[in-house]
Amino acid sequence: MKINAQYNIAEPESIHIKIAAHQRRKMFKRFLTDTGIRQDDTVLDVGVTCDQSYSHSNYLELWYPYKQCITACGLDDATFLEEMYAGLKFVRADGRNLPFANREFDYVHSSAVLEHVGSRKEQRAFLREALRVARKGVFITTPNRWFPIEFHTIMPFAHWLPENTFRKICRMRGLDIFASEDHLNLLSSSDLRQLAEEAGMENFKIACLTLAGWPSNLLLSTRETVFGEDLH
């Protein structure tokens, strides 16, 4: 099975990807409302992909109208984004060690990246860096581990098994990349809350997007806060 740069095996026209596009549209709307971002606010999008197999790859760059306010960064070479969207800036960087100053951006956005950065220690570093470079707030999404279908492997229930068992099943199916914690480390709501607290987020909320009535994606956000200081 071919795994694309978005850590996914689904075909572009599959029902799975159509559902994903629907969910991402909802995430984008929640980003706008949960942060209260204004058109002159700057935003750093952490973890953009070089993959263009899906129409909604890098959805923030696609749908956010104020391209000149976006700085996109990631491990992949996504310089094509600068050509696609006039005014946008791309910087190749690791979200766990961002090359930006404290409070350099008004908001930090990152969608479906946190589960791919490695161990809980690496995930905590990722959140800490997002908080460090944000002046007003952050908005981070990740799949809910307790949704019945695992989004990347499209396997039902296997990810509810003990971690070692799930990773063994991945290897048996030829999905070795998902057998490594470095590439897939799923989170529950309680896991995400603990990570946010350990990363120093003092004013945050965790919400859910639902699919067929089941919480499918976790949304971590802070608003109008700088290291616990209310900006209002």
Image (cartoon, rainbow, N blue to C red):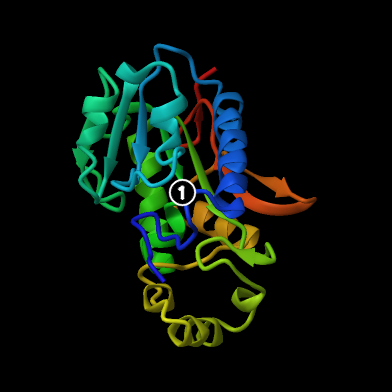
Q: Which residue is mark 1?
A: 200
Q: Is residue 186 above or below residue 202?
A: below
| 167 sits to left or right of 193 | left
Residue 101 in view of the camera? no
Quadrant in which the C terminus appears: top right
What residue is rendered at 50% in x and 63% in y? 152
| 98 sits to left or right of 178 | left
Provide residue 223's location: percent of width, then percent of height: 54, 29
Quadrant in which the N terminus appears: bottom left
Mark 1 burial class by Cα count in 10 Å: few <14, some 14-19, many 20+: some
| 36 sits to left or right of 100 | right
Provide residue 169's location: percent of width, then percent of height: 52, 85
What residue is rendered at 22% in x and 46% in y? 93
Kind of element beneath mark 1? loop
Q: Name which quarter of the figure residue 114 lies in.
A: bottom left
Q: Residue furthest right?
A: 213
Q: Nearer the viewer, residue 77 or 13?
A: 13
Numbered label tally: 1
